């Protein structure tokens, strides 16, 4: 069987290896001059390639498309992914939250391992930007066109990814390719994405990175996400691991607010005692110097502004009410979410090819026989932790192994 794969990202390369191992003659068509551009930047260049968890945890981390993926995960699990890479000589380690990385901390090692295995199996890699899919007289998808180049085979696996980080090559081409054949594509939005805030004081705090803070995301006043970790302020609002994770819990409707507990280890009473201690130690100090003991320098003036306290007030002139306002702000430094940053800045794309139109066992299109759709192009997305790459590996495995098409 000749299998044509469009896209040499995580899903496309993995499908190529699996299909070639089953004896298929495989051609991968990748628009970039090299494969795996996005994969190289995953996990801050370290590649969090999966999550060493059980199936329940896996599904709990997939807010969209979990049920569809059940069968693909049952056939090819995180532990199978780990065994795959270890068999090819990649030493792996499991970090906090069961996140799996190569011991080398090099995403490039994952790309090179896939590349070497593709070469060993004789997978042909061709550079070209596919602009349409071709069909045989019976309506089966059997090939692709990329400009003047035509490539024909027995089936096509589409693995063109989503629409985030377009400089990696994933510009959303796959959506137009499948729409042209009658597929439905649900609304495309970014997930795991920085957030713009209504408040302008973020810009004053730009570059400040907070560690060990608790971030709570509320929708219409109701908490939908809360976690301890790291975040940072930017010229437009907020970003960093906690913010990206929080964004994955946002639906389109609703008023969203962010609440930062800057001192999660202390109760308001303990924090007040701490503040009183700072004041007693230096009663003549002005408020900004006192707050420097509790906050990064660039947060001091925005904090004072929010408490509506005159900046030059001395510690010994601070009223109890003012002190408690400071405590309140330290425990609940709040922002209103204006919107997410644009899709190009998201880590992943939410939305994609409608799952109703794809077989969950084989990833074959229910509309166009011979066409298989895998990876981020599908209407599935997950939280951070290696789950998005697991979607790529498992759906690729399912498509490569679609037994009923084997001849
Ligand atoms: C900064 C960043 C960090 C991330 N870190 C992690 C992480 O640590 N763990 C994790 O699980 N997930 C992570 N992700 C998400 C993960 O990278 C994606 O979910 C995954 O790469 C999706 O795989 P894919 O093969 O479907 O798409 P992609 O990896 O995007 O591959 C698609 C490929 O198709 C090619 N292509 C597109 N259109 C065409 C066309 N018309 N013709 C030919 N080729 C085409 C593209 O050039 C690209 O190479 C991260 C994403 C980003 C942006």
Image (tube, rainbow, N blue to C red):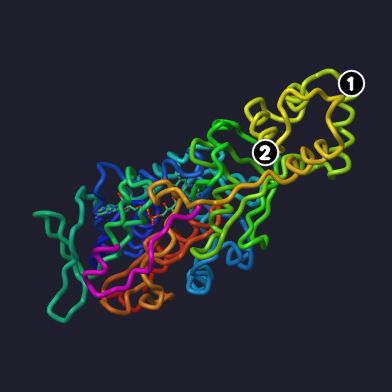
Quadrant where the C terminus sits is: bottom left
Residue position marked by numbered label 2 in the rendering: 306
Residue sticking out furthest to the left: 148
Q: Residue 210 versus residue 103: which sits nearer the camera?
A: 210
Residue at 88% in and 43% down: 269
The residues colored magenta run 175-192
Residue at 29% in and 42% down: 34
Percent from the top left, x then y, of residue 312?
73, 23
How crowded pointer 2 is (Cα within 10 Å; few <14, some 14-19, many 20+) is rated as some
Percent from the top left, x then y, of residue 258?
62, 50
Q: Residue 47 versus residue 356: which sits nearer the camera?
A: 356
**Along the horizontal axis of the image, is 260 left or right of 249?**
right
| Magenta-colored stretch includes residue 184 | yes
Percent from the top left, x then y, of residue 193?
49, 49
Up-down: is 190 above or below 288?
A: below
- Badge 2 element: helix
How crowded pointer 1 is (Cα within 10 Å; few <14, some 14-19, many 20+) is rated as few
- Badge 1 element: helix
Quadrant where the N terminus sits is: bottom left
The residue mark sitting in front, 2 or 1, is: 2
Q: Residue 86 versus residue 35: which sits nearer the camera?
A: 35
Residue position marked by numbered label 1 in the rendering: 281
| Magenta-colored stretch includes residue 11 | no
Does the numbered disc 2 mark a residue whose Cβ is under 8 Å from ligand 1?
no
Distance between mark 2 and mark 1 Cα atoms = 25 Å
**Along the horizontal axis of the image, is 88 left or right of 186?**
right
**Along the horizontal axis of the image, is 376 left or right of 289?**
left
Residue at 43% in and 75% down: 360
């Amino acid at each position: 069987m000749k299998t044509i794969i469009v896209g040499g990202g995580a899903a496309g390369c993995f499908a190529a290896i699996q299909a070639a191992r089953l004896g298929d003659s495989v051609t991968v068509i990748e628009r970039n001059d090299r494969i795996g551009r996005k994969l190289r930047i995953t996990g801050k260049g370290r590649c969090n390639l999966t999550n060493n968890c059980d199936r329940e945890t896996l599904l709990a981390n997939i807010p969209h498309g979990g049920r569809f993926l059940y069968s693909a995960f049952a056939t090819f699990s995180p532990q199978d992914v780990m065994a795959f890479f270890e068999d090819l000589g990649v030493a792996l380690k499991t970090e906090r939250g069961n996140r799996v990385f190569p011991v080398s901390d090099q995403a490039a090692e994952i790309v090179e391992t896939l590349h070497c295995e593709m070469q060993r199996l004789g997978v042909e890699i061709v550079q070209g930007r596919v602009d349409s899919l071709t069909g045989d007289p019976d309506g089966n998808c059997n090939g692709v066109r990329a400009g003047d180049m035509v490539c024909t085979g027995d089936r096509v696996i589409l693995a063109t990814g989503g629409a985030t980080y377009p400089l990696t090559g994933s510009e959303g081409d796959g959506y137009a390719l499948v729409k042209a054949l009658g597929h439905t594509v649900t609304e495309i939005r970014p997930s795991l994405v920085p957030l713009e805030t209504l408040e302008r004081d973020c810009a004053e705090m730009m570059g400040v990175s907070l560690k060990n803070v608790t971030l709570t995301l509320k929708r219409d006043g109701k908490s939908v996400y809360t976690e301890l970790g790291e975040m940072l302020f930017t010229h437009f609002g907020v970003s960093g691991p906690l913010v990206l994770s929080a964004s994955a819990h946002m639906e389109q409707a609703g008023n969203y607010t962010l609440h930062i507990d800057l001192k999660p280890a202390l109760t308001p009473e303990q924090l007040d005692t701490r503040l009183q201690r700072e004041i007693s130690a230096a009663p003549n100090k002005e408020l900004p110097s006192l707050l420097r003991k509790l906050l990064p320098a660039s947060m001091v003036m925005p904090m004072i502004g929010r408490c509506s306290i005159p900046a030059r007030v001395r510690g010994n002139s601070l009223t109890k009410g003012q002190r408690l306002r400071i405590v309140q702000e330290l425990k609940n430094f709040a922002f209103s979410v204006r919107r997410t940053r644009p899709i190009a800045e998201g880590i992943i794309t939410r939305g994609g090819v409608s799952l109703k139109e794809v077989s969950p066992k084989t990833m074959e299109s229910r509309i166009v026989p011979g066409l298989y759709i895998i990876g981020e192009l599908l209407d599935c997305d997950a939280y951070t932790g290696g789950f998005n790459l697991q979607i790529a590996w498992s759906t690729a495995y399912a498509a490569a192994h679609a037994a009923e098409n084997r001849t």
